[in-house]
Image (cartoon, rainbow, N blue to C red):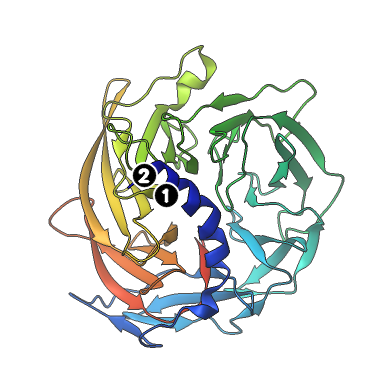
Amino acid sequence: MNLGKWARWLLVAAPLLAGCGDFWQAPSSSSTCTTNCTTATSGNFYLLNAGSTPEIVGDSIVSGTLTAISGSPWTVTGSPYSIAMAPNGNFLVVSTTSGVFAYPISSGKLGTATVVSTDQAYAVQVDTTDSWVIEAIQGTGGVTLGAVPISSTTGANTGTEVTASFTVANAAVQTNKMAVSGDDAEIFVALGAGGTIVVPFSSTSPFPSGVKAVTIPVVTSGGSALSVAVDPSTTPRLFYIGETLANSAGTSGGLRAFTYSSLGSSTLTQATGSPIASGGLAPNFILPVSSPDMVYVASGAGTGTAGNVTGFSVTASSSTYTLAKVASVAAGVQPLGLAVDSTSTFVFAVGSLGSPYFDAYTFDSTTTGQLDSQITSTTAASTIAIVAAP
């Protein structure tokens, strides 16, 4: 089988299939608590559903039961691309074919959406000061980044957007695959066959004239950068890229890890073990967590095969970092998003191509970093992304 050709087909087909969840029939419409069920309670989290009725669904886990937030679900205008939670938890942002919208949050409930911009942003994020919505917009022969000033209370637009455009060969902005570093200094965007772009940023002066970006090519010809993440700290150690064909043999998905400080040098420094096989053909989402010190990758293995979430430990010796696989846990077909809840008790996974469509895992009490499945939902909801309240 030509895996390179298959992977390129998947990049085109998966977003289209994700928006067609109504064609996928779930075996049941209930959420089920599985092995070693917990009685723990989580913070609030929000799922972005595509399909014929785009919406945001708000949930939490209460005493081991998946429980809807009052007022959920909330309607989304247009077909959705991306969702981001403000670091202060005051609002969340959704981008769609109709523009970018901010939803204020009060006691977990979403308020009336306001228009942030009319851009079709394939990916959005909120900077660490809660003062800017960052947009990644597909351009001709490259990518445009936009920074829209907003209210840190409601997310509403408060001024004029600042933009910067970059020429990148074969750039294809991946939906919902952008990260902002915890020191607010760098923006990372996965660009498919175009690799990954890293753009300097400042909340006091976004994208000043002449700003220069770093483009990181894919490690294997024919591969594609599907996902990107950065350590959740104000002093990041590593940033991560998930690519097809990036394992050591160039035949399957791989996780790449680079030292953050090397962005200022002429040569990027990779962690020991990088790139490392990510657990499937398509590393669709990356979630670094600080406790335990792990990075998790949600990977797909095809359109009819169950995916997984694979955990990798991160160890440090002086300024040298090492990645090592810990364990994998089953997920639905083509899992597309991950999030950790505010209590650091649960890791959530969502996808839209095959049951289960939602998984809630807890951290194993014996093996550090291993995830244990606790709650699953087999309701087909065309879920393409998830965020958790801080």
**Tag 1 residue:** 6
The Cα atoms of the two marked residues, 2 and 1, are separated by: 6 Å
Of residues 381 and 207, which is closer to you in this image? 381
**Tag 2 residue:** 2
Q: Position of residue 355 (x, y in %)?
A: 36, 74
- Amino acid at circle 1: Trp
Q: Position of residue 192 (x, y in %)?
A: 54, 41
Residue 248 — which label? none
Which secondary structure, mark 2?
Answer: loop
- Amino acid at circle 2: Asn
Residue at far bottom of view: 29
Q: Position of residue 183 (x, y in %)?
A: 55, 34
* Image: 53 above or below 267: below
- The answer to whether mark 2 and mark 1 are in CB contact below 8 A is yes
Which secondary structure, mark 1?
Answer: helix
> Which residue appears at 38% of the width and 62% of the height?
343
Q: Position of residue 66 (x, y in %)?
A: 40, 80
